[in-house]
Image (spheres, grey):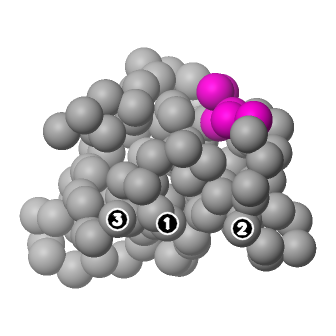
Amino acid sequence: MWGGSGNDHYYFNGQGFDRINDGVTNTGAARTDGAFDTEDVLYVSYAANDLGLNRIGNDLVIFSNADAVDNILNSSVVIENFFLGSHYVVEVVATSSGAGPAYDLTGLLAA
């Protein structure tokens, strides 16, 4: 999924393997504009207490903790180049039902 400029909303239903790259335009070219999104949101179908996060290189992988328990990754969403910052950052992850809190992912950049 490509976001491009402007604040984007992504939806992951917890099935399959999706990738988000917010640092490219709708044609797939790298974004070079000076404007940075500040309210990109990823909605996931996982319960708030079931979110797992892992860093692999510059990517942020979001998955169900149930996958961590059984050591079999059945589904995930990868935010490509998240840890490069700037255009690649999706700022918030929230449950799609709105039943749980939203998590500010920008704090991970300081880690």
In the image, 106: left or right of 98? left
Q: Can the viewer see residue 100 in this picture?
A: no
Q: Can the viewer see residue 47 in this picture?
A: yes
Tell me, yes or no, whether the two marked residues, 3 and 1, touch with CB atoms within 8 Å: yes
Residue 29: x percent and y percent? 78, 73
Disc 3 residue type?
A: Asn
Q: Secondary structure at mark 2?
A: loop
Q: At x 81% / y 37%, what residue is drawn?
A: 6
Residue assigned mark 3: 58
In the image, 45: left or right of 65? right
Secondary structure that dominates the magenta span: loop
Residue assigned mark 1: 80
Disc 2 residue type?
A: Ala
Specify start and end residues of the magenta stretch as a single range: 35-40
Q: At x 60% / y 63%, what residue is drawn?
A: 20
Q: N-terminal of the two: label 3 or label 2? A: 2
Residue 104: x percent and y percent? 41, 26
Residue assigned mark 2: 30
Q: N-terminal of the two: label 2 or label 1? A: 2
Q: At x 65% / y 27%, what residue is drawn?
A: 39
Q: N-terminal of the two: label 3 or label 1? A: 3
